[in-house]
C-alpha cells in the first residue's frame, strides 16, 4: 500500500488510457492510478486523508466522454484536475473549454515529467513556501520601498503601537507581519483581526473574550485575541471600522494594558504590541466623529505609510517576476517570463488594486498563458500605446486598431494573425472577445 505523509493513499484518477510507461512512472513516485472510463461503473472511494488528483487525458477523449468527466468531476469539486495534452488553440467543444477552465494545470501529452513535478508538490508542505515574512519578503528596490524597510527595522525594536496606512493591496498586512518577525516578540504569535469584517457584537468578544453566559449562546468562557496573543502582537486591520464600544476597550488596552472579558468586570493584564492598519484617512474619521480622537493619538505613534504601487513604478517588473517565479516553484506553468510588450503594459498600468492586483494578474496569466512568454492579453492588460522602434506596425496607438489591422492583413485567418502578432491563437481569440470583434462578421464583410 502506498501512502502519503498524512497516512492516506496518493491516487491519480486518470480519465482515459494511461500507457504502461506512464503507470510505471507514477507508481515509482508512490502514486496509485485509477483509470476510469465512461463505460466503467467504478466508484472512487476517497477518505479524508487521501491525496487525490484527477487527470483528464485529452489524447483520446471524445466529446461524449468529456461530458461524462465533467459530471464526474463536478461531484468532487475539491479534487484538483490536471489536463494532459489539452487541445491546442481554441478548444473546439464547449465541454473541453469548461474543463480547461477549472483545471489546476495543463501539461503536454508526450512527457509525464512536468505532471510528476506538480504531483510532488502536493501534500508536501516542505515544498510550499513557509518562511515567516521578514523585511526581505517585502520585495522592491524603489526608494520608497527602501525607506519603508529602514523604518521597519527602526520600529521593530521599539515596543510602541504602529499605524500602517495605505491603499488596499499595498502590503499593509505583509508589513505588519514583517515588523512582528523583526521584533523581540517574534517567538510569540501575531494574531490578526479585520475590524470591519465582524459584526460589532461579535467583535467585542472576539477581541476580549467572554464569560460563560455573558450573552445568549455564550456556552462557556472564551479567551479573546488579546489574551491569546499575550507576549506577541495583535494586528488590527481596517481599524477605522472599529465600532465605538470596541474603540473604548482598545483605548483601555493602550492606556492601562488591561482588558475585561465581555460579561466580567475583572481586569486582566495583557502584554501585546498593537499594529493597526487603515486604508481610510483616520484624521478625517476623527473630524467626522466616527473615530475617538484620544484613540487616534494613541495609535498614531509610529507611522508606516505604504505608497501606492503606481508611486513606485520601478518595483512593478521586479514584483511581477518574483510572483511568476513563486508560482512556478509550486505549480507547473509553461510561461517563463514576460514579453517586451507585456513588460511595457505592466509599467504603464495604473494598478488601482496595487500589489494584490499585480499578484492576481500574474498568477492568472501563469495559469492561462500558452507560450513561454506572458503577453498583454494573458495579463488582461491593454496593449501599451505605441510600439517599439522597428516594429512594422509602429504608429498604432490603439490596441484594437492594431488587432483589426493585423486581422485584415492576415485575411482574418487566426493562425496567420497570431504569427504576425507573435502571440498564440488563443490570445488572438481572447483579444477579439475583449475588443468586441466578431470574427464571422469581419470575415463576411471582408469576403
Ligand atoms: N512588497 C511586496 N513584496 C512581495 N509581496 C507583496 C508586497 N506587497 C504586497 N505583497 C503581496 O500582495 C498581496 C497584498 O498585500 P497585503 O499585505 O494583503 O495588502 P493590504 O493589507 O495593504 O491590503 C499579498 O499577497 C502580499 O503578500
Ligand atoms: Mg489587508
Image (cartoon, grey):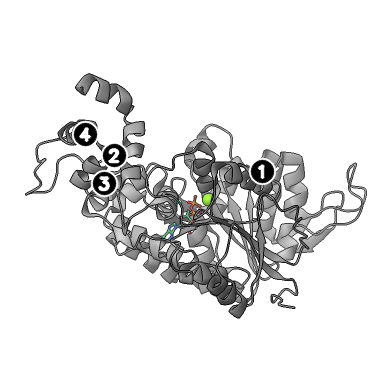
Circles 4 and 2: CB distance less than 8 Å? no
Instruction: Tell which tag, 3 or 4, sits nearer the viewer.
Output: 4
Circles 3 and 4: CB distance less than 8 Å? no
Instruction: Tell which tag, 1 or 3, sits nearer the viewer.
Output: 1
Circles 1 and 4: CB distance less than 8 Å? no
Residue count near mark 4 (Cα–Cα under 10 Å), binned few <14, some 14–19, many ≥20: many
Residue 407: give its label.
Answer: 4
Q: Earlier in the sequence, mark 4 or mark 2?
A: 2
230 sits left or right of 361 in the view? right
Q: Residues under labels 3 and 4: Cα distance? A: 21 Å
Residue annotated with mark 1: 71
The relative height of residue 122 versus residue 28 in the rendered view (above or below) is above
Q: Residues under labels 2 and 1: Cα distance? A: 36 Å
Q: SS for tag 4?
A: helix
Marks counted in the figure total: 4
Q: Earlier in the sequence, mark 3 or mark 4?
A: 3
Q: Nearer the viewer, residue 1 or 186?
A: 1
Q: Residues under labels 1 and 3: Cα distance? A: 39 Å
- Residue 269 placed where, x, y %? 75, 65
Residue 48 visible in the picture: yes
Amino acid at each position: 500500500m502506498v501512502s502519503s505523509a498524512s497516512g492516506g493513499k496518493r491516487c491519480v484518477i486518470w480519465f482515459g488510457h494511461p500507457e504502461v510507461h506512464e503507470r510505471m512512472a507514477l507508481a515509482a513516485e508512490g502514486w496509485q492510478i485509477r483509470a476510469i472510463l465512461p463505460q466503467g461503473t467504478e466508484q472512487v472511494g476517497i477518505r479524508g486523508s487521501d491525496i487525490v488528483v484527477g487527470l483528464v487525458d485529452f489524447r483520446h477523449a471524445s466529446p461524449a466522454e468529456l461530458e461524462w468527466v465533467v459530471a464526474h468531476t463536478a461531484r468532487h469539486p475539491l479534487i484538483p484536475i490536471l489536463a494532459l495534452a489539452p487541445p491546442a488553440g481554441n478548444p473546439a467543444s464547449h465541454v473541453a473549454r469548461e474543463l480547461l477552465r477549472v483545471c489546476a494545470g495543463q501539461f503536454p501529452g508526450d512527457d509525464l515529467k512536468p505532471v510528476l513535478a506538480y504531483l510532488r508538490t502536493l501534500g508536501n508542505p516542505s515544498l510550499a513556501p513557509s518562511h515567516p515574512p521578514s523585511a526581505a519578503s517585502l520585495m522592491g528596490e524603489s526608494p520608497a520601498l527602501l525607506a519603508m524597510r529602514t523604518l521597519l527595522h527602526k520600529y521593530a525594536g521599539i515596543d510602541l503601537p504602529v499605524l500602517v496606512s495605505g491603499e488596499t493591496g499595498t502590503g499593509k498586512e505583509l508589513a505588519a507581519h514583517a515588523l512582528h518577525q523583526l521584533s523581540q516578540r517574534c517567538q510569540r504569535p501575531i494574531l490578526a483581526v479585520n475590524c470591519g469584517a465582524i459584526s460589532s457584537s461579535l467583535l467585542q468578544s472576539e477581541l476580549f473574550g467572554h464569560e460563560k453566559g455573558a450573552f445568549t449562546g455564550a456556552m462557556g468562557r472564551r479567551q479573546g485575541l488579546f489574551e491569546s496573543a499575550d507576549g506577541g502582537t495583535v494586528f488590527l486591520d481596517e481599524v477605522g471600522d472599529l465600532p465605538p464600544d470596541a474603540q473604548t476597550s482598545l483605548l483601555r488596552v493602550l492606556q492601562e494594558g488591561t482588558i475585561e472579558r465581555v460579561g466580567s468586570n475583572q481586569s486582566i493584564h495583557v502584554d501585546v504590541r498593537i499594529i493597526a492598519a487603515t486604508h481610510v484617512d483616520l484624521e478625517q474619521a476623527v473630524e467626522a466623529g466616527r473615530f475617538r480622537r484620544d484613540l487616534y493619538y494613541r495609535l498614531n505613534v509610529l507611522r508606516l505609510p505604504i505608497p501606492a504601487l503606481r508611486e513606485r513604478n520601478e518595483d512593478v517588473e521586479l514584483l511581477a517576476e518574483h510572483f511568476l517565479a513563486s508560482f512556478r516553484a509550486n505549480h507547473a506553468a509553461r510561461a517563463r517570463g514576460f514579453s517586451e510588450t507585456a513588460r511595457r503594459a505592466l509599467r504603464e498600468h495604473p494598478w488601482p488594486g496595487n500589489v494584490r492586483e499585480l499578484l492576481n494578474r500574474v498568477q492568472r496569466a501563469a495559469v492561462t498563458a500558452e507560450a513561454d512568454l506572458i503577453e498583454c492579453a494573458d495579463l488582461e492588460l491593454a496593449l501599451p500605446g505605441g510600439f517599439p522602434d522597428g516594429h512594422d506596425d509602429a504608429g498604432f496607438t490603439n490596441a484594437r486598431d492594431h488587432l483589426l489591422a493585423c486581422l485584415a492583413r492576415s485575411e482574418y485567418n487566426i493562425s496567420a494573425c497570431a504569427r504576425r502578432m507573435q502571440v498564440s491563437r488563443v490570445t488572438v481569440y481572447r483579444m477579439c472577445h475583449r475588443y468586441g470583434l466578431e470574427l464571422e462578421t469581419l470575415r463576411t464583410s471582408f469576403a
